Image (spheres, grey):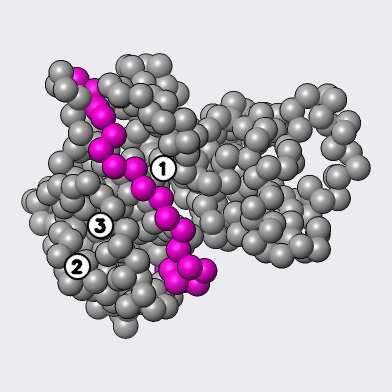
């Protein structure tokens, strides 16, 4: 498994900060966990989407980051910083270029900006890309390109905050793209179906990434996540949001056995209120993908994020969507030389994006 041990992964979410770093194993094989931290952020501090990413109080955010990173044993050579998925817009673009043009990263970036952005927004966005495939044709190279865009003002703000804290940022990235790399690296050759769905259930959003033969072919961000589940649960039970957030993970919303299903019937209206819209959005997303690609069955689904920890959720989704569904817990697959504490192991799906930042 190829993971960077020289750097610290810092995953910025709309709900929490997560930090993770690894050391090489003593014998030169495997890893040990050097640092593993998680801290909730004040509501509304990190928010907004692609058009309006927001850190509402930069001074307060900087203070929290300073205190948070001070808890790390070692800053190592620098940080890989993951941005909230909803701040970054991903596009899959087909581009025809001449072979000699492929060598110019700046030129390809300019072409992509011209194709994807209105003229008045070209200077406001940072654009990066990865070439997924390039096939020779009589007219040049037909390229399939994954393009990521984020507001320049937000990267400038974060860069300034980290620079003032004397924290060296090596790269900004999206927090869930590396999860697929973790899956590939943790499976021996030909033991993983390379066509799969990653479903990251975060605090504000659910991010769907669909891969076919190792290539990302579709992404959708659904504006429903753990926060919405908590609010709807609070309204249904007439309790405070904080109480709902504390109680919701202890409730058995998703029945597995026939006995549990029968016992849940009186609570079906609560289930529909809390999860009905989310499940409908997932169904619409998967149905669109199947109809577009004329695909009969869904590939396997891997769940990550805090709300992936709902008891019974993978088993329920396996039955509901008719495909294998499991939690993505890369800590279980990691060749670790020291024992991982049970409370950290249980948070594996929550830490998957942070570990994904360290994947090569």
Q: Nearer the viewer, mark 2 or mark 3?
A: 3
Q: Is residue 92 visible?
A: no
Q: Is residue 288 above or below residue 323?
A: below
Mark-to-mark CA distance, 1 and 3: 19 Å
- Residue identified by numbered label 2: 165
Which circle's residue, 1 or 3, is located before the other in the chain?
Answer: 3
Specify whether residue 41 is painted magenta. Answer: yes
Residue at label 3? 70
Residue 359, x across and y down, in percent = 27, 38
Q: Nearer the viewer, residue 253 or 298?
A: 253
State the mark number for residue 351: 1
Q: Splitting the image into 4 quarters, where does residue 157 fall? A: bottom left
Please give the name of the residue rendered at 22% of the width and 46% of the height, measured from the top-left corner. Answer: 73
Specify whether 98 is left or right of 288. left
Q: Nearer the viewer, residue 154 or 285?
A: 154
In-image side of 137 versus 332 (left or right): left
Q: Residue at x 27, y 69 (%)?
A: 158
């Amino acid at each position: 498994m190829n993971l960077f041990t020289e750097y610290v992964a810092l995953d910025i979410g709309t709900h929490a900060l997560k930090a993770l770093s690894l050391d090489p194993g003593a014998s030169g094989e495997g890893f040990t966990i050097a640092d593993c931290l998680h801290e909730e952020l004040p509501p509304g501090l990190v928010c907004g989407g692609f058009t309006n990413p927001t850190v509402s109080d930069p001074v307060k955010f900087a203070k929290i980051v300073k205190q948070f990173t001070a808890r790390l044993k070692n800053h190592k050579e620098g940080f890989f910083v993951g941005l909230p998925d909803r701040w970054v817009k991903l596009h899959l673009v087909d581009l025809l270029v001449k072979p000699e043009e492929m060598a110019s990263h700046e030129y390809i970036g300019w072409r992509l900006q011209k194709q994807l952005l209105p003229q008045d927004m070209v200077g406001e966005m940072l654009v990066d890309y990865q070439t997924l495939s390039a096939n020779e044709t009589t007219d040049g190279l037909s390229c399939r390109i994954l393009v990521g865009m984020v507001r320049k003002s937000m990267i400038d703000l974060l860069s300034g905050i980290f620079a003032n804290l004397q924290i060296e940022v090596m790269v900004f990235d999206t927090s869930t793209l590396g999860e697929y790399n973790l899956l590939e690296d943790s499976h021996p050759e030909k033991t993983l179906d390379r066509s799969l769905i990653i479903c990251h259930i975060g605090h504000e959003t659910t991010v769907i990434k669909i891969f076919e033969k190792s290539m990302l072919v579709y992404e959708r961000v659904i504006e429903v996540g753990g926060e919405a589940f908590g609010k709807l649960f609070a309204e249904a039970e007439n309790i405070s949001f904080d109480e709902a957030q504390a109680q919701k993970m202890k409730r058995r919303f998703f029945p597995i056995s026939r006995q549990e299903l029968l016992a849940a019937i009186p609570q079906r209206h609560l289930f529909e209120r809390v999860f009905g819209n989310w499940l409908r959005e997932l169904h619409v997303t998967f149905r669109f993908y199947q109809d577009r690609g004329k695909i009969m069955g869904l590939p396997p689904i891997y769940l990550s994020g805090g709300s992936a920890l709902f008891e019974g959720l993978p088993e329920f989704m396996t039955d509901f969507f008719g495909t294998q569904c499991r939690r993505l817990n890369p800590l279980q697959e990691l060749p670790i030389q020291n024992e991982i504490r049970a409370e950290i192991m249980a948070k594996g799906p929550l830490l998957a994006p942070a570990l994904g930042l360290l994947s090569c």
